[in-house]
Image: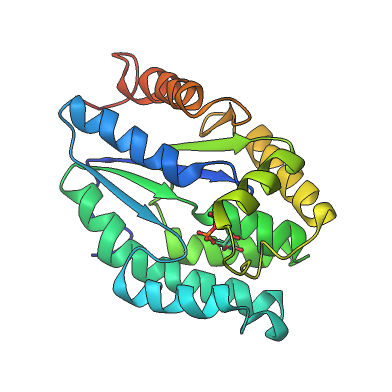
Amino acid sequence: MNATSARLGRFITLEGGEGAGKSTQSRLLAERLRLRGFECVTTREPGGSPGAERLREILLSGAVAPLGATAEALLFTAARIDHLDHTIRPALARGAFVVCDRFADSTRAYQGALGNLDPVLIRALEHTAVGRTHPDLTLILDLPVEVGLARANARRGDAAADRFEREGQAFHEGLRKAFLEIAAQEPARCAVIDASRSVSEIADLIWAAVESRLLAPSAKGVA
Ligand code: TYD
């Protein structure tokens, strides 16, 4: 399966900072799509295929951080290539919805904006990995940094923070700004969702965006 394979399904990504509730919302969105009769594959990055899950362990352990942002971006990209080849493109080719918790916008925000990597390099890596398999809809779950970090801490309990959760307030403020800038640059692809609301309210906002942009009769090419 390669970047030019036929594509019948729809590709939705969820992006945002820590504690935005992306994994819960991925699950709820998939349930709603299945109730409407669609096959839906939920997946995540880094990871989502056996090879990429092995790279995930290395990336989140912090072992790559000392090698610098370029090395991290290359490994996230390597994981993305495996994920696209083994999970995302096969699902899209058979007509399924794919709902993915983080994707290439996370590399743009974390390694690009915050790692200060050259945007030309970030674009080149994205182009190489993603090709034409860009998301049809990206949901940017936006919320104040304090709220997100408090939620992430509560969820983690006594477990150790991962490499990115250990970063300070300024890092997370920069992250929020980077995601909002992506949304402003690509409004046709991105919808900003107020993730400071309750779980069910966020789910309703997400469903409204999916219905209007992908399922409405005026939307392109979905049954
Ligand atoms: P995860 O536990 O999945 O975090 P979250 O619940 O916040 O999604 O860890 C993924 C981490 O990897 C997260 O901090 C963001 C980071 N990341 C990047 O830095 N670049 C990337 O391209 C991706 C996909 C994730």
Q: Residue at x 55, y 45 (%)?
A: 15
Camera-nearest residue between 55 and 78: 55
Left or right of 67 on screen, residue 95: left
Furthest residue in direction front, as rendered: 158
Camera-nearest residue between 7 and 171: 171
Q: Quadrant of residue 51?
A: bottom left
Measured along the vertical axis of the image, is residue 104 above or below residue 176? below
Q: Residue at x 34, y 62 (%)?
A: 84
Q: Residue at x 22, y 41 (%)?
A: 8
Left or right of 189 on screen, residue 53: left
Image location (x, y in percent) of residue 87: 27, 60
Q: Name the quarter showing ligand 1.
A: bottom right
Quarter holding the N terminus is: bottom left
Image location (x, y in percent) of residue 91: 22, 51
Q: Residue at x 47, y 77 (%)?
A: 57
Q: Is residue 173 visible?
A: yes
Measured along the vertical axis of the image, is residue 156 above or below residue 56? above
Quarter holding the C terminus is: top left
Image location (x, y in percent) of residue 3: 33, 60
Q: Is residue 18 visible?
A: no
